[in-house]
Image: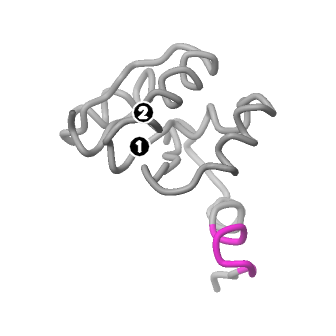
Amino acid sequence: MPSVAALANGALALKLTLAGLPVQTVQDVQDVEETLGGLLESDVSVVVVQEDFRNQFSEWFIERMKRRKGGPLVVYCPGFEEEESDVDAYLNAVLKPAIGYEIRLE
């Protein structure tokens, strides 16, 4: 099994495939939870997950993700379908929980 795996659909799945990542195409959040759950028990080191699914995870799965220890590292990747995005809001949403304080770009 490869050391990196990706779970995505649509344009992001194509972009990740073109970048050389092995992509498992998923259709809905239940498919993501089931596939990601299996990958968490495998020898994969990094799992890239399409960020659109992150806010749709069930409460049970969110708690499972919080309780787990060790690998693999789960990285959420934006879909890049929006023309304009609020970079500051995105960075705060990602970095603040990880490092504990807000960063402002000037």
Give residue 60's mark.
none
Please provide percent x and percent y for residue 65: 64, 44
The chief SS type of the magenta part is helix
- Residue contact at pointers 2 and 1, CB within 8 angstroms: yes
Disc 1 marks which amino acid? Val
Please provide percent x and percent y for residue 101: 75, 81
* Label 2 residue SS: helix
Q: Residue at x 42, y 33 (%)?
A: 39
Work out whether residue 43 or residue 78 is closer to the camera in this orientation and state it. 43
Disc 2 marks which amino acid? Leu
Work out whether residue 75 or residue 90 is closer to the camera in this orientation and state it. 75
Task: Identify the residue position indicated by label 1 in the image.
Answer: 47
Q: Left of 15 or right of it: where is 41? A: right
Please provide percent x and percent y for residue 92: 70, 68
Magenta-colored span: 95-102
Q: Residue at x 58, y 40 (%)?
A: 51
Task: Identify the residue position indicated by label 2 in the image.
Answer: 39
Res. 15 image quadrant: top left
Gap between marks 2 and 1, in whole Å?
A: 8 Å
Please provide percent x and percent y for residue 82: 57, 40
Quadrant in the picture for the N terminus: top left
Quadrant in the picture for the C terminus: bottom right
**Residue 3 painted magenta:** no
